[in-house]
Image: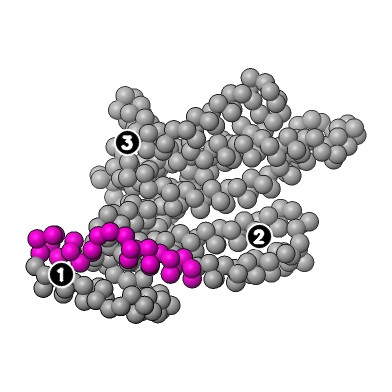
């Protein structure tokens, strides 16, 4: 209980220390959107041929006619009230749009991270058990391939092989087939909502639709996870407690799993948290290739038309999730390693 309390105390301190960073993200994103080329009033006033009077009406509606400090003050006040603005693309509040699309991005990212962890940890362990061997070189080559190939290229290759050539995968257009009835929305995660509804066929359809985009994202992040696992395992296998365990006659696999891997997994937890936050914000190419209705593609569409509010809301959401994930990693690290003390 003392260890958990100390870990939670440290997490609370880190959260408080992250608040100025979140405020800085708010201000920086607001200013950045104002200096980028393009005028949203021109775009939403029916294009460049719109009359000046129509453009000015749109500018007043968006609050762009006010001085920049006033715009910033109003924006910060509205964010403090929980109002992220209204999207000119969809006509809905940004908070509502993000709430509707975030489960799709989380479902895709969490599935991809799970695939990456299940693949990367065994690969890293195998490479560490036989350093310099053919297995080790093969793991390194596979990791290099995953890093070097962009996600949109690997995604298109997977579509070509599994959808076009083999016909195993469904049509890569969204989260669910158009002929499948959507389940009642309880969590926003289709594979969970279908299970809660008892619809096995719908679950299978959603799972098949999810596999290719998740595998595309997983291929890109397997490399850092496998590398850190390999490096951590090599350090653990060369440590004194492993040599002691071997000297008392414990089986080799028990030493590897119980002692070496348990200590080597701590850096992997840290890297997994960073990787998850990066994946959630950087999966826009995957979402575009597979027509996945997530928050990243939503923000990109808004950026292309200079719709300020969705982009600002997206960046704030990603920064908040990054802070929360870091706090969660800190808690898990403290639980996994009781030696961790309050910073």
**Foreground of the two, 71 or 333:** 71
**Where does the image place residue 234, in percent across and percent down from the top left?**
73, 34
Q: Residues within 10 Å of mark 3 (few under 14, many from 20)?
A: some
Check if residue 25 falls in the magenta segment: yes
Q: Secondary structure at mark 3?
A: loop
**Where does the image place residue 184, in percent across and percent down from the top left?**
35, 58
| Residue at horizontal 72 percent and vertical 64 percent from the top | 343
Q: Which mark is residue 55?
A: 1
Total label count? 3
Q: Most prominent secondary structure in the magenta stretch?
A: helix
**Foreground of the two, 297 or 30:** 30
Q: Earlier in the sequence, mark 1 or mark 2?
A: 1
Work out how far the residue at label 3 is from the one at label 2, CA to CA, in angstroms.
Answer: 39 Å
Residue named by callout 3: 170
User: Quadrant location of residue 210?
Assistant: top left
Q: Earlier in the sequence, mark 1 or mark 3?
A: 1
Q: Secondary structure at mark 2?
A: helix
Work out how far the residue at label 1 is from the one at label 2, CA to CA, in angstroms.
Answer: 51 Å
Give the number of the mark in front: 3 or 2.
Answer: 2
Q: Which mark is residue 331?
A: 2
| Image: magenta residue range | 23-50
Q: Residues within 10 Å of mark 2 (few under 14, many from 20)?
A: many
**Foreground of the two, 202 or 108:** 108
User: Quadrant location of residue 247?
Assistant: top right
Work out how far the residue at label 1 is from the one at label 3, CA to CA, in angstroms.
Answer: 44 Å
**Where does the image place residue 138, in percent across and percent down from the top left?**
58, 23
């Amino acid at each position: 209980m003392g260890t958990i309390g100390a870990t939670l105390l440290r997490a609370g301190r880190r959260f408080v220390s992250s608040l100025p960073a979140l405020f800085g993200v708010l201000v920086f994103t607001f200013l950045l959107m104002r200096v980028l080329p393009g005028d949203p009033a021109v775009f939403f006033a029916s294009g460049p041929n719109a009359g000046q009077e129509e453009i000015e009406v749109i500018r007043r509606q968006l609050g762009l006619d006010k001085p920049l400090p006033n715009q910033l003050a109003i924006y910060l006040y509205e964010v403090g009230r929980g109002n992220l603005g209204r999207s000119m693309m969809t006509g809905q509040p940004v908070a509502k749009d993000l709430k509707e699309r975030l489960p799709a991005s989380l479902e895709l990212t969490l599935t991809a991270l799970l695939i990456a962890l299940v693949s990367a940890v065994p690969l890293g362990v195998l490479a560490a058990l036989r350093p310099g061997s053919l297995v080790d070189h093969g793991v390194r080559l596979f990791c290099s391939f995953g890093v070097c190939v962009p996600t949109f290229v690997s995604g298109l290759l997977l579509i070509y092989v599994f959808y076009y050539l083999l016909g195993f995968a469904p049509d890569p257009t969204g989260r669910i087939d158009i002929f499948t009835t959507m389940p009642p929305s309880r969590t926003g995660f289709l594979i969970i909502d279908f299970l809660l509804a008892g619809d096995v066929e719908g679950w299978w359809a959603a799972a098949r639709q999810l596999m290719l985009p998740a595998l595309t994202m997983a291929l890109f992040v397997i490399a850092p996870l496998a590398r850190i696992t390999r490096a951590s395992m090599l350090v653990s296998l060369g440590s004194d407690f492993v040599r002691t365990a071997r000297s008392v006659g414990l089986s080799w696999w028990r030493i590897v799993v119980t002692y070496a891997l348990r200590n080597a997994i701590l850096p992997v937890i840290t890297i997994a948290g960073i990787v998850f936050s990066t994946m959630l914000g950087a999966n826009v190419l995957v979402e575009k290739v597979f027509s996945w209705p997530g928050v990243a593609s939503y923000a990109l569409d808004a950026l292309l038309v200079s719709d300020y509010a969705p982009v600002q809301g997206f960046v704030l959401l990603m920064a908040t999730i990054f802070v929360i994930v870091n706090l969660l990693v800190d808690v898990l690290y403290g639980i996994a390693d009781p030696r961790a003390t309050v910073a």
